[in-house]
Image (tube, coloured by chain):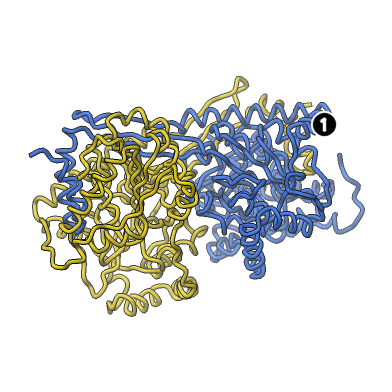
Chain colours: A blue, B yellow
Amino acid sequence: MNAPVNDLAALAPLEIRRLSTADAGFDAALDHLLRVPTDSDPGIAERTAAIVNDVRQRGDAAVLDYTRRFDRLDAPSVAALELGQADLKAAFEDLPAAQRQALEDATRRVRAYHERQLQACGQGFQYRDEDGTLLGQKVTPLDRVGVYVPGGKAAYPSSVLMNVVPAHVAGCGEIIMVVPTPGGERNPLVLAAAYIAGVSRAFTLGGAQAVAALAYGTATVPRVDKITGPGNAYVAEAKRLVFGQVGIDMIAGPSEILVLADGSTPPDWVAMDLFSQAEHDELAQSILLSPDAAYLDAVQAAMDRLLPTLPRRDIIRASLQGRGALIYTRDMAEACAISNRVAPEHLEVSSSEPERWEPLLRHAGAIFLGQYTSESLGDYCAGPNHVLPTSGTARFSSPLGVYDFQKRSSLIGVSAAGAQVLGRIAVTLAEGEGLQAHAQAAALRLQP
Amino acid sequence: MNAPVNDLAALAPLEIRRLSTADAGFDAALDHLLRVPTDSDPGIAERTAAIVNDVRQRGDAAVLDYTRRFDRLDAPSVAALELGQADLKAAFEDLPAAQRQALEDATRRVRAYHERQLQACGQGFQYRDEDGTLLGQKVTPLDRVGVYVPGGKAAYPSSVLMNVVPAHVAGCGEIIMVVPTPGGERNPLVLAAAYIAGVSRAFTLGGAQAVAALAYGTATVPRVDKITGPGNAYVAEAKRLVFGQVGIDMIAGPSEILVLADGSTPPDWVAMDLFSQAEHDELAQSILLSPDAAYLDAVQAAMDRLLPTLPRRDIIRASLQGRGALIYTRDMAEACAISNRVAPEHLEVSSSEPERWEPLLRHAGAIFLGQYTSESLGDYCAGPNHVLPTSGTARFSSPLGVYDFQKRSSLIGVSAAGAQVLGRIAVTLAEGEGLQAHAQAAALRLQP
């Protein structure tokens, strides 16, 4: 599996930032490290708005035009760009047996986890006051959702599973996948994942035009209620624009990992975990915190040794040198406090006593406990979702889940007796707010 | 309570739209009716961005400048604009006894409902695979939230309760309220509600400058993790701009009510319920659906009779004539189907058998069951939240709730044995995606 080392640069030691919490300028250095590089091409917003408006106006015709232009795909109709269930099934059946099995295993585990999630937090409730008044909340699945799957380099079948399975478990009536196939090239793993995860319909469409088609509907593409899934800057901007017309999931920033290590995990393992984040893209961020200085050295040495063996070493190097850091802390408790400040997307507690530190960790997308829990196991098949809040947004947001494909409605059924009690309160408050019709609506239900 | 009728216009019959589902053009007429009027002053976005950036750069000094300019309030420091707990308490204690009691009663009921909600859907879960692998999700409250409360005309103490209580029940560490006091004029009911609901700190700040101060923090105003609460177009735009830096709640459109009536509720009651929505603002929307044509006439007659008695009759008339409708349906089932298409914020099932229709209703912010359940009881004191999705967004979003002040973190603790099973799946899938470091991170944990 080791790729040949064919250049000297690959052998140069990694110049990765070293910080210590005891440094005078540590707080400022950490803030600087966490600053998210922004993609600030103002042309993207303008071009995306033009595409979205055009698709909204001209529907299928505009979708076809943009697909021709951006994906070099010339189709007679949008219907011709739809993949049938037979296409998806064939993609699955044509896979090597090991891949088929791995997809099935991963899907089964992801489904099991999300079914537990549905049981734990996807239920409504009802109760009655003594006077018979009913109060509660009902939970219903979204009718129809759209899942965006990127094409090209970043076409990840695991993303298909992680977006489609929770929608399926939530009970969404219809799940529409869009995936660009530039030049007509289809990714068989993506189609196979769509099959096994339970996509209802699939279109080989991408970019802002696909997002707009899902948000507003066209003659061929049905209008959905929510759009989830990652994409490039145009897709992100299109999702931002159609938000309100449909729901969207979060707009993800660069991916991140933070590892808290007490020194008990083999350094090679932690080095590879840091690499697995860094290999995603040059803006990805990998940070290691440890109160064991010798361990930080050992991980750095392991990184220097292992880096040349990896095909994506150039991306890894750029990511680690640009945004990575090894941070020496006073103790594990301080490392936990810093982790709460970072609110990382992925948080590994690479410790012999993870249960000791877990209660201290308040903000993180996913927490990986103990040395055997590499982030990559969570990315693919442990069960929890790999769509997680980035850029510190774990302070206020959550992993993608069944709850993102459900919505709640309050239930209120006031009894005649209840209306007497509630009516008097409402009249007083409504009059205080100067809303006389509100007060009268309550007063009319009062018995004399 | 009846205001004097001092002009003839107040006596003119309401010219409210009548539709029938049997009409040829009904679908188009309904679509037209539901179109949300958009506030499209492009200057607002530009001016708001300038304010937000200025506060981000200059902090307190900028906040003071804008407060001076927009609220005509000249303070020596932002600290001087903070209200102490003693100020809030005094506001509460100075209220007339009836208002004090009503606020206490409403708060107790709203708290009780949200505590049920916390029990029902605010909990985490954990389970173990046979091989000892731990999977789960933990739920934690947000550390610090900001609640925006509008000043002036639309200063509603009930809004304070509905935003603060769920944050409090969720266990947020600190709840910061901002409320503009133009010209220094404070609303005692708002301050009293802040006291009773449990606000931690309060600043007499408003507008985009208050939102920016909460999002980025200043020397005096602490940075929060999420901002909720309604406001004018500048506040809404500022929330849009800071989204990502902090969480925000939904950005509300005009308020709406849809009433499904089988004819069993006194027409006066339904007329007043339609008015209570319409009195909010001229863009508010009130729609009545009934399969009983004589009942529609009776409600219209009741409206004509009751309208002149209401102080806000001009707003009500403008709202009902501009955006209201009485719709004749084939039967109640068809009325329910149309309601699902509308996905209204407030949905009254004014029927003698509401439990028959409730299961058919899939999309609504809050469902009010039976003739005694006026929307106004829900607005103030039934218990459920009155912050609800508008403009059809109930298709994919939910009432404000405890869950909006919590976030979830996945928990994954893979055992040594589990790593053998999961590792093989992850290696296959990671290689399929071309991510060798992911594959290696899993492979290193495999025992030979």
Residue closest to the eye, A138 or B255: B255
Residue B11 placed where, x, y %?
18, 61
Residue B385 placed where, x, y %?
32, 45
Image position of A218 (left or right of A335): right
Q: How many marks?
A: 1
Residue displayed at 18% across by 53% down? B306
Q: Secondary structure at mark 1?
A: loop
Residue A168 placed where, x, y %?
59, 33
Q: Is residue A305 above or below residue B133?
A: below
Residue sitting at the far top: B130
> Which quarter of the picture shows residue B320?
bottom left
> Which quarter of the picture shows residue A368?
top right
What residue is shown with label 1?
A: A95
Residue displayed at 33% across by 36% down? A411
Q: Is residue A395 above or below residue B188?
A: above
> Which quarter of the picture shows residue A374?
top right
Which quarter of the image is occupied by the N terminus of chain A? top right
Residue closest to the eye, A299 or A249: A249
Residue closest to the eye, A80 or A158: A80
Residue displayed at 7% across by 39% down? A448
Amino acid at dot 1: Leu
Q: Is residue B193 above or below residue A143?
A: below
- Residue B173 appears in the rendering: no
Write down the chain letter for disc 1: A
- Residue A412 appears in the rendering: yes
Image position of A269 (left or right of B401): right
How packed is label 1: few (under 14 Cα within 10 Å), some, or many (20 or more)? some
